Amino acid sequence: MNTFKTTGRVAIVTEYRGPTNTQGARIRVSREGRRAKMYPYPYELDQGAAHAQCAQLYATEQGLNIGQWIGAGMPDGSGYAFVMIEVTP
């Protein structure tokens, strides 16, 4: 059986932002102590996959793409949270 543990390094939070008169829908991605970034909503994906893709793009741009990520919806329904994990057999 595999066990999982978080690395304790960082959590990435995503939030859906609806369209306006001038911009299409977006996903806001942020992490503590860093500037948030907006990504166009990838309509070709379902909701969870869209948030995961934007979080992965952000992680790569921030130099955090060094492990596996796991995510889940926020309890208040405001978005998703992703944390890096280590998998040990």
Image: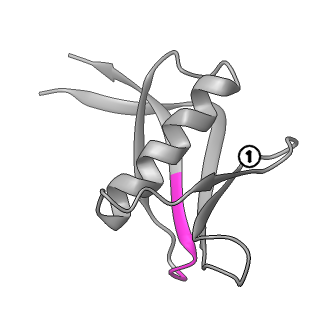
Between residue 23 and residue 63, name the one nearer to us: 23
Q: Quadrant of residue 58?
A: top right
Question: Residue visible at 35% across and 60% down?
Answer: 48
Magenta residue check for 78: yes
Question: Residue visible at 58% across and 24% down?
Answer: 60
Above or below, 24 relative to 85: below
Between residue 21 and residue 29, name the one nearer to us: 21
Q: Residue furthest front?
A: 22
Classify residue 63 as left or right of residue 35. Answer: left
Between residue 33 and residue 41, name the one nearer to us: 41
| Disc 1 residue type (three-letter) | Arg
Q: Where residue 44 appears, x then y in whole percent?
A: 30, 57
Q: Which residues are magenta?
A: 76-81
Q: Quadrant of residue 65?
A: top right
Q: Where residue 87 appears, x then y in whole percent?
A: 32, 22
Crowd class of label 1 (few under 14; some 14 to 19; many from 20; radius 10 Å): some
Colour pattern: one colour
Q: Quadrant of residue 2?
A: top left
